[in-house]
Structure formats: structure tokens, C-alpha cells
Image (cartoon, rainbow, N blue to C red):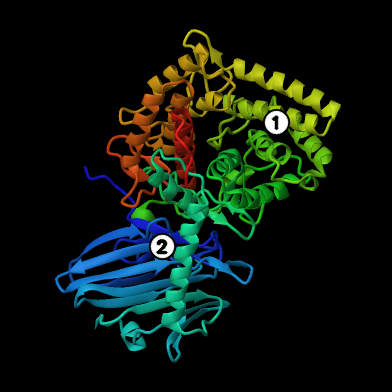
Amino acid sequence: MDRHTYQTGIIGNCAYLAHINKNTNVDWLCWPRFDSSFVFGGLLDEEKGGEFSIRPAGEYESRQFYLENTNILCTEISDAEGTYRITDFAPRFHQYERYYKPLMLIRKIEVVEGNPRVKVKCKPVYSYGDEKFTSSRGSNHLLFEAGAEMLQLSTNISLSYIEDERYFALHEPKYLIVTYGYKLEAPIASTADRFLENTKAYWRTWIKHSSIGSFNQAIVIRSSLVLKIHQYEDTGAIIAASTTSLPEHPGSTRNWDYRYCWMRDTYYVITALNHIGHFEEMERYFNYVTDISFRNDIRYQPLFGIAGERTLTERILTNIKGYQGNQPVRVGNQAFEHIQNDIYGQVLISMLPLYNDSRFIYDERQDSSQWLDSLISKIERTIDEKDAGIWEFRNIANIHCYTNLFQWAGAKAALKMAKTINHVDFQERAQVLIDKAAKHIEDCYDPERKVYNHAVGSKHLDASTLQLILMNYLEHDSQKAKDHLIAVEKELKAENGLFYRYKHSDDFGKPKSTFLICAFWYVEALACVGRVDDAIREFELLLKFGNHLQLFSEDVDETDGSQWGNFPQAYSHVGLMNAAYRIATKLDKPIFL
């Protein structure tokens, strides 16, 4: 059986993300925001998703690669007539004392060898395929309009060739510049080339300013670049993925919209950014979380929109075929209504840098008392409550080990903060919560099997309990940590190094795919308990589950290694980065980049 991998690379500039297929088509591009309708959505429907391709007439071969240490993607197409290269990028660089990151996609086409002939097809759509743009012709551009939406395609290619979809010979570099919401007035070729050089310089400087160790350095660099462009810089939010409704497994109906920011992942993301030394991105994300955290809500929801929106009503698009025919296609995510009580601890430990990192100044924590009181009160109200857990079960509630672990860790963080601001009452309340959370966690322990079950009163195991080791609830050199790891890996680890979240039935039956971030948690746990050689071996086994550009999905099929789920999954890359850092620390190799 052939292994399924996603045949796209991504480009972005922290204002938008686009997926470029090896066949040259822009398979996915949402404008003006990550969570807007697609203007090119062939990923979910080749007909209603529109098209933006640059293809030859006959059969061809394709290869894709990134310009080293950048988010600039090259696609080379070779046929009997010759070879041409398409360089796709989203402009990003420093200009006028700020980052220039326009809603602009630039495609440069140039001959590599021979005399290739190509056809450009540009057919944008809107309202998830329900609306088509009307086009009008200018001197060197096509203007696309649909109601209040406007795109402009500026080019030095004959407009007749594009409008008539005719093949033409490539003799010199050609440029296609698509802008959203405004008209490009600048010269085409020189602007595109200048933006390309500036963008290339920006990304390479960004990597040079990263702290990335020598252990599997190239793959960590790529993951860092992936994570960076999943941040919506306007607010600081980091989305789980740029796509919606890519199935966790064919026919599973587990097709979710991941274009939002999950509070449950706050700690992992901030940890990854801290490891690579990017304070600016960490601070932006921190500010997004802070803005949400200072609201006087009775409880937080598991996820928010990229501008902090609370209501993410889920609806099904009946007009879209879905990826390889997989239904349903969802927009919005009903999980915003769920009860997920680990997030208060996630927020607290994520805010801890305000109190122990000297890069933050005292004025930035001036509302500490009010904020800490609010968070401690939220844990006090929910610590004995059943919830949906980290995996957001839709109709199942338990007192989850993982939830209480993060309440324990959050209360410990609150204790440190309370000591910093010398607040005795908060210290006493935090200690009560630490003890109560630990009691719930121990209620999950099975002394006969020497393992922590996923919930009180359950015999099922869950990969999320690996965090008992990673979060230092279980001392790394203790036999209890080692026994727990052995029991979990025995039940949930696949032969090829992959890891299941759990194997028991949920709202949709038993899971058929492994969850990639769990495999990286497993690698971290191995390193923590001193099994460093095992950690290195398992880490390197996992690298084969990337696509042709070393981009990783959310889910992987154990039987054939196929990629499934939304792609690329930012948190799979976060898991990779944190696992590599953990191993590098154990190896004591220098951080030198």
C-alpha cells in the first residue's frame, strides 16, 4: 500500500499562510485572516476551490525544496521541453520601523534549462466556493471582485495568455503578484525581486538569531520556521494548523477546523519558543494569552479565535466535497463550548516568566493580585469537577489525570508567583490546591500495574500521562517514573515508534491513527528517565513520517506511515522541537547557532 503524504509546502509571513502543491497549484489560501474563507481551496474541492497553477502541457516531474533557512518555496517542473522553477513566497521584512507583511503572494517563474511552455490558470473563489469573482482587465493586471472582496493579479505575462488559458514559451523571468484588498502600483519585476531578496535576508537573519543546538539541527530549524509562520502577528495568537477538515483517518468523520488557538497548548508553545531564544514571538503570544486571561470570565474555554473571539460556532459546508471526498467539511469548532479544566494551570505556568524572567519588567505584572486571585479561584471551583480532558471528548466526562496534573503544576506556579509578590493568603490557597490535585492524581494510580490510568476509576491508559514525567510530578530518577513509562509504552507504542493517544473507544469509536505529538512526548520521557540512547533512536525513527519537505501532520497511520489530520500541525513541530532540546540537553552539546 502506498504511503499517503500531503503534497504541499507552506509559505507565510505571519499575516497569512498558503499551501503550494508539487503540481504548482496554490491548494489553500485563506484571506484576509487565517480563519477566513479560502480564495484558493483545491485542497478540499478541486472544482469549487478554484485554481492558481502554472503547468506544462504534458506529463512532467516535480520536486520541491525550500531556499535554505527560509520560508521561501521552490517548485521545479521538468518535461520533455525543459525545466522551469517557480519561487513562491509571502513578503516579510523590516521596513519603516515595522515588519512589512502584506496580503501579497509573489510567484516568480524562470527557466532552468531548455524551452519550457506553460499555462497560467488563476480562478479565485470566495465564501467557501459559493461565490466566484468577476474579472476585469487593466494595463498589466487582472482585477477580481466579489461583493466587497477584491484581489488583483499584477503580472508581466500577456494578459491574453492568462485570460484565454493559453500555453506560452518562457524566455525570461515572469512574475505573478496577487494582492488582497488593494492595488499594486509599483513596478512588477523589480519589486518582486527586491521583496524576494529582502524576505530571504529576513528569514536567514531570524535563524541566525535562534538558539538551536547541534542535535538534528536542520530539522529543528525547519520546525522553528513552521512554528513562526503559524503565529498571527497582529494579535500574537498561534494557531494549531492553517487547514480545516483534513481527516484524522479516511472515513473517520474526525474532520476538524484547527485554525484557532488552543489554550491547552500554551505551555508547550512558549517552552518551544523559549528554547530557541525567540523572546519577541514568546512575548507576543504571552500578550495574547494575557489579554484573554485578564477577562473576568467564570471559566475559560479550550480555544479562542485569533483575535480572542469566544464564539466559534461550528457549521458543516454541504457544497464542498472534502479532502479526497472525506465528509463532513467543518468551519468553526464546537470544542469552544467544552469544559476543559487543565487550561487554568496551562495559563498559570505560561505566565510564570513574568515573575522569574528578568526580560519582563515589574510594571508588566502590576495587576498580579487581581489576576492571581482570579486564576486560583478558577482552579478552586473546578478542581473536583469532571471535564472533557485534553482530547476534548464530546460526550464523555471524567476526573482526568492530565487535567489534575496541570492544576497541580499551575498551583505550584501560583505559589511561586505569590511568594514573589509576598502574598501570604495566595500562598496558602495555592498549597491547598497542590495537595488536592496530587490526591486526584494519586487516585488514578494502579499499584498492581504500576501505572497511572487516564482518569479516576478507569483502567484505560493515555499518552497524556507521560506529562507526569515531563512536568516533574514524578522524579526522573524514580522507579515510579520508569515503571509508568514502561507500562504506557507497552500498551500505546506502535512498533515503528508511533504512539496512540489512547486505544479505548470515544465518541467516534476506537482511534485508527496515532497522534504524532504523543510520540515526541514519549521521546522526551525516555530522555528524562535516562534512556537517552532509546530517545535518540525513537526521535530519528519519527523523522521518516514527514513529507518531502519534512513537514509533519497531526496523525499518522501505524500500518503504512500515512499522514492524516490537519497539516502541517504546528504542535507536532512544537513536540519535535521540545524533544530535540531535551535530548540535546542530556547530551550536553553546546547551543551554538
Q: Which residue is mark 2?
A: 72
**Residue 37 shown left or right of residue 548 in the figure:** right
Q: In 3D space, how far apart are the residues under numbered discs 1 and 2 (Cα atoms)?
A: 40 Å
Circle 2 — which element? Answer: loop
Q: Quick check: 549 above or below 539? A: below
Instruction: Examine the rendering and report whether any part of residue 135 can be seen.
Output: no
Whole-percent x, y for residue 14 in the image: 54, 60
Residue type (three-letter) at the residue carrying disc 2: Ile
The amino acid marked with disc number 1 is: Ala
Q: Residue at position x 47%, y 20% from top?
A: 529
Residue wearing tag 1: 413
Considering the image in quadrants, where does the N terminus appear? top left
Q: Give above or below for 170 relative to 436.
A: below
User: Quick one: which residue is furthest to the left in this view?
Assistant: 80
Q: Is residue 26 left or right of residue 336?
A: left
Instruction: Name the spot of residue 300 as percent of width and height, x first.
Output: 69, 42
Name the residue at 51% across, 64% down. 37
Q: Earlier in the sequence, mark 1 or mark 2?
A: 2
Q: Position of residue 343 (x, y in %)?
A: 64, 37
Which sits in the foreground, 274 or 549?
274
